[in-house]
Amino acid sequence: MRLAAAADLQPVLPPILDKFEQQTGIHVLASYQSSATLATQIIDGAPFDLFMAADLSFPQRVIDAGKAEESQPLAYARGTLVLWTRNDSGVKDLSLDALRGATIQSIAIANPDHAPYGRAAKAALDHAGLLSSVQPRLRIAENIAQTAQFADSGNAQVGFLSLTSALTPRLQADGHFIRVPAEDYPPIIQGAIVVRGSTGSAAAHQFLEFLRSPATAQILSASGLEPFSMHQP
């Protein structure tokens, strides 16, 4: 089965895919990119069986293009936006308010046009009245995985990351984070669709069922996603 997965799932899915293969014998080949990039590829005919995005809008684009089995995206988890910095970045008191000062000279965010977490970061900055003042200091990454690389490598002093990135062993060792208040940005409801006419449709449905299991929900939760029972929002 071929899975198109949002970049925030890269730290989360590998152990889940391993367990799924152990239980079913079905091997899943996952491609991790921004939700927008994957949606475009599927609409253009890329041979994916399942699309797990970081929001609902990009699966909806696939539905609107007539390329999905579902009439609405299936919500599988809620994501959390955090502000992260390296322990040696020189940022003493990490907060949104700290972005007002001149101490923080570079801020990594995912491209708001391509990545739901980037869109959430932009909304949070706008909500705090910071967007125009920090605009010259933004370092725009293609997706949330690259945003984490920017921040962890020191190419940016701080980064708006997914909680899934911030909880990886490397980033936990290298830095620290605060959660951006949930009321500062629209909910990051992550949605999935099965690609219409795909050869692995049955396996895709089987994997979505596997995501509903309590054991899988525990892995999602420990990795920084709030799991949903699969439903149509």
Image (spheres, rainbow, N blue to C red):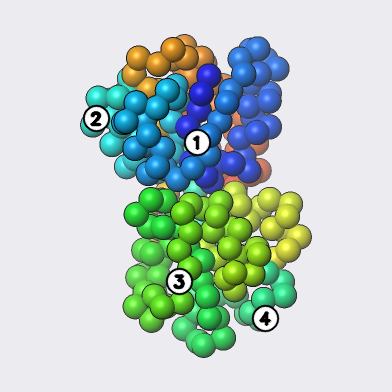
Q: Which residue is mark 4?
A: 90
For label 3, the crowd category at 10 Å Cα-Cα, with few meaning under 14, some 14 to 19 and many 20 or more, is some
Q: Between marks 3 and 2, how big is the CA–CA gap?
A: 33 Å
Tell me what residue is drawn at x 68 percent, y 69 percent: 86
Relative to residue 91, is residue 80 depicted above or below? above
Q: Which residue is mark 2?
A: 65
Answer with the quarter of the image where residue 84 lies.
bottom right
Tell me what residue is drawn at x 69 percent, y 58 percent: 171
Residue 35 visible in the snapshot:
yes
Give percent across and percent down for residue 89: 67, 76
Give percent across and percent down for residue 179: 55, 62
Tag 2 near tag 1, CB within 8 Å:
no
The label nearer to you, 4 versus 3, is: 3
Give percent across and percent down for residue 124: 40, 66
Q: Between marks 4 and 2, how big is the CA–CA gap?
A: 47 Å
Q: Decide if residue 39 is on the left or right side of residue 159.
A: left
Tag 4 near tag 2, CB within 8 Å:
no
Direction right: furthest residue? 173
Q: Which residue is mark 1?
A: 5
Q: Which residue is mark 3?
A: 138
Marked residue nearer the N-terminal end (1 or 3)? 1
Q: Between marks 2 and 1, how big is the CA–CA gap?
A: 19 Å
Marked residue nearer the N-terminal end (1 or 4)? 1
Relative to residue 169, is residue 10 depicted above or below? above
For label 4, the crowd category at 10 Å Cα-Cα, with few meaning under 14, some 14 to 19 and many 20 or more, is few
Tag 3 near tag 2, CB within 8 Å:
no
Q: Which SS class for mark 4?
A: loop
Tell me what residue is drawn at x 59 percent, y 58 percent: 148
Relative to residue 91, is residue 174 depicted above or below? above
